Image (cartoon, rainbow, N blue to C red):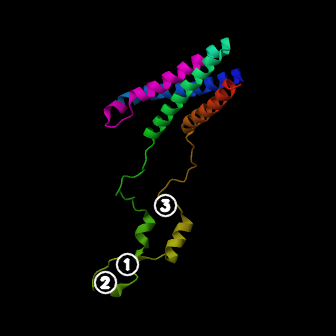
């Protein structure tokens, strides 16, 4: 179990190191400092530093077998995961739209506006009272369900799998470390 935890921790750290390197190489540190409310660099580097400290402590436990080192590494890991969750929370763009911001109209929304009660409006006014789905709209949607979009296959962005794998590897590492330390 000690070695499995060490391997899991190395995989997690490798994925995290890859993300940190990519973020730094693409100017992430400069961008975060430049924008108001950007991600604090101490959060990123604290997360990485604690993860590395915990990994080294776990390696010392594997070499010596001292239980105190195992629980110290678990403590490092708990704080590291907490900082990682903070990072994900601050980086996640929520809400997707600002309060009061409206979505863009789609081509079929404009065609869907028809006046159904013309008696309620004054003569000459064409204020829409309700939406009505027409046969023409249904035919157009069946012919082209996504108007204006290209018809090429969607290429999945595999880069999003790296942080997901990092998170699952961190969970696995934590479970393995607590299980091993408690034996």
Residue farthest along the bottom direction in this orientation: 119
**Considering only order in the chain, which callout, 1 or 3, is on the residue closer to the N terminus?**
1
Q: Secondary structure at mark 1?
A: loop
> Does residue 101 appear to the left or right of 89 in the view shown?
left
**Considering only order in the chain, which callout, 2 or 1, is on the residue closer to the N terminus?**
2
Q: Between 172 and 121, which is closer to the camera in this rendering?
A: 172
Residues packed near mark 3 inside 10 Å, few (<14), some (14 to 19) or many (20 plus): few
* Quarter holding residue 115: bottom left
- The reply to whether residue 67 is in sight is yes
Q: Residue 87's x, y, as percent?
A: 46, 35
Q: Between 111 and 173, which is closer to the camera in this rendering?
A: 173
Q: Between 136 and 168, which is closer to the camera in this rendering?
A: 168
Residues packed near mark 1 inside 10 Å, few (<14), some (14 to 19) or many (20 plus): some
Residue at (28% x, 81% y) in the render: 125
Q: Is residue 117 magenta?
A: no
The circle on residue 147 is: 3
Q: Is residue 45 magenta?
A: yes
The circle on residue 121 is: 2
């Amino acid at each position: 179990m000690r070695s499995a935890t060490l391997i899991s921790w190395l995989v997690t750290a490798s994925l995290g190191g890859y993300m940190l390197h990519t973020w730094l190489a693409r100017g992430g540190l400069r961008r975060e400092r430049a924008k108001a409310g950007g991600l604090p660099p101490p959060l990123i580097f604290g997360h990485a530093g604690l993860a590395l400290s915990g990994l080294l402590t776990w390696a010392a436990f594997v070499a010596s077998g001292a239980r105190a080192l195992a629980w110290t590494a678990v403590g490092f890991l708990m704080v590291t995961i907490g900082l990682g969750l903070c990072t994900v929370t601050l980086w996640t763009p929520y809400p997707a739209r600002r309060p009061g911001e409206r979505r863009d109209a789609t081509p079929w929304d404009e065609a869907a506006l028809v006046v159904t009660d013309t008696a309620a409006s004054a003569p000459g006014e064409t204020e829409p009272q309700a939406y009505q789905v027409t046969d023409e709209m249904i035919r157009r949607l069946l012919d082209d369900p996504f108007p204006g979009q290209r018809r090429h296959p969607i290429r999945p962005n595999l880069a999003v799998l790296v942080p997901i794998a990092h998170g699952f590897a961190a969970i696995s590492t934590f479970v393995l470390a607590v299980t091993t330390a408690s034996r």
